[in-house]
Image: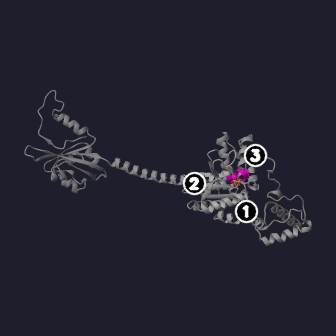
Amino acid sequence: MTVPASVRGRRPASRADASAPLGQAELEAVLQSSFDEIFITDGEGITLRVNAACERLYGLTEAELVGRHVADLEREGVFSPSITNRVLATGRQETVVQVTRTGRRLVVTGTPVFDEAGRITRVVSVARDITELNRVVEELAAVESLANRYRQEIAALRARQEEGEGLVFRSVAMERVLSLVRQVAEVDATVLITGESGVGKEQVARLIHRASPRADGPLMTIDCGALPQSLIESELFGYERGAFTGANRDGKRGLIEMADKGTLFLDEIGELPLSLQVKLLRFLQERSVVRVGGLRPIPVDVRIIAATNRDLRQMVREGRFREDLFWRLNVVPIHVPPLRERPEDILALAEHFLARAAVRYGRQRSLSREVADILMRYPWPGNVRELENLIERLVVTSSGPVITPEDLPDGFAPPDRGLSTTGPVEVREILPLADAVAEVERQLLALARRRYRSTHEMARALRVNQSTVVRKLRRYFPPARDTGAGEPVDP
Ligand SMILES: Nc1ncnc2c1ncn2[C@@H]1O[C@H](COP(=O)(O)OP(=O)(O)OP(=O)(O)O)[C@@H](O)[C@H]1O
């Protein structure tokens, strides 16, 4: 409702004039039908008229208010502050927020009405209840601040997810790997990722790149084991035009050059031929490449990440890997443990691959308890890659929605349900306890000897001292009875 800033005199009435002055009855109707409170005083501040809204807002009837001075009503706390007093003091239209004794909050606009001599004869105040509005505004502010918090949490989660994108794990061992990844990503140091085949070394390399300041630059990967020796050099270093028969006439940039401002991932670095190891070392020292058939050094700004499933130290000892290159690469070593050493990750990864296959093949599958038990006990020589392949295969080949032991390929023996064979050791006949213990020790050592390359690794897996492993190997596999496999070599 709009109230004129001030009302001076009256305009003469005319039949066609839509803005002709309102009659008494019309004014009365406006007054009483207004949902907003209308409060009229004389030029002294004595209440003359109020509409019905006063009861709702002040808890007093019109009869109880008429004749009262606004200053008294203010003193009694009927409303505070008094708008009329303010208008009388300033002689101008005023607006305030008023609090009433019924606990309502009102926005009140008071407008003076003057006579011909410029004296205030009336003050007309219109009040709108904003209590609810205020509550809604407060609620909105609370909702907005909650939404902001959620937004931040989602952003933080997304950042974490992107940072750890694709890397599924529950184990402390992998948590340690990830925290190392975060630390190393920030700096340009060369990283050497070690671990068995299929443990996720490439995945870790990608993570480092994505979490690094070079994330917007390229990530170039070269599998040193997959390329024929003759091609690796030109692939890595590029070639000048006419460098060799069959080469592109204009020459070609190598992967190192292409990785400029980004990351170069040298996978299977242990497979790099010795001749190229020298060239790579020179690049690492000088940070510039000379293309095949070229002379001009081209400066390149790359971060190097190398990975291997070989024991590079052993290769250095055997003269198959240059020691100076090893130390250049091994600035920050990150070891990704095999899956069998982090069994907490097995089912989490299986679930992840099931969900991915469900989307890919439109088939919702779950693992039966027995299958979950079998997967937990399996040693996973092919690590995460083997698990990934198995799950994908099971989703495609299993007949029902639940994957059962019968769906598993050969080699995944279902767990025995017999009383005596609930664990990984199976007892088939009764024999003296000491003999049984010795037999278990013998079989365990035989298995560990096949799986690990050194007595140190065996000791770690069997959770005994290395000297114990050596002693027991001599006891169970004395040289005369040795099968010919030979004892594991220690670094
Ligand atoms: N923690 C993980 N979460 C999800 N997927 C994983 C994880 N680790 C490995 N993978 C998946 O397993 C497969 C093998 O991983 P990756 O290629 O990184 O292993 P690798 O150690 O580099 O193997 P190789 O030594 O044979 O090159 C990939 O498909 C990868 O996406």
Direction top: furthest residue: 16
According to the image, label 1 marks what residue? 321
User: Do residues under tags 3 and 2 come within 8 Å of each other at their CB atoms?
Assistant: no
**Residue 304 position within the rendered picture, expressed as x and y whole percent measured from the top left:** 62, 58
Structural distance between the alpha carbons of marks 3 and 1: 47 Å
Q: Is residue 435 left or right of residue 15?
A: right
> Would you call the spot at circle 1 few (<14 residues within 10 Å), some (14-19), or many (20 or more)?
many
Direction right: furthest residue: 480
Q: Which residue is pictured at 84% across the width and 69% down the height?
A: 472
**Number of marks in the rendered image:** 3
Q: Of label 3 and label 1, which has the lower sequence position?
A: 1
Q: Is 230 within the magenta?
A: yes
**Residue 165 position within the rendered picture, expressed as x and y whole percent measured from the top left:** 60, 52
Q: Is 328 within the magenta?
A: no
Closer to the eye: label 3 or 2: 2
Q: Is residue 181 above or below residue 490?
A: above
According to the image, label 2 marks what residue? 262
Q: Which amino acid type corresponds to the residue marked 2 in the rendered image?
A: Gly
Q: Which residue is pictured at 63% across the width and 61% down the height?
A: 284
Q: Is residue 431 left or right of residue 220?
A: right
> In which quarter of the view is residue 209 placed?
bottom right
Q: Is residue 414 left or right of residue 203?
A: right
Q: Which amino acid type corresponds to the residue marked 3 in the rendered image?
A: Thr
Q: Which residue is pictured at 27% across the width and 51% down the height?
A: 97
Q: Which portion, as a residue range, is magenta?
A: 225-233
Q: Nearer the viewer, residue 481 or 105?
A: 481
Structural distance between the alpha carbons of marks 2 and 1: 26 Å
**Residue 294 position within the rendered picture, expressed as x and y whole percent measured from the top left:** 63, 53
According to the image, label 3 marks what residue? 404
Closer to the eye: label 2 or 1: 1
Q: Of label 3 and label 2, which has the lower sequence position?
A: 2
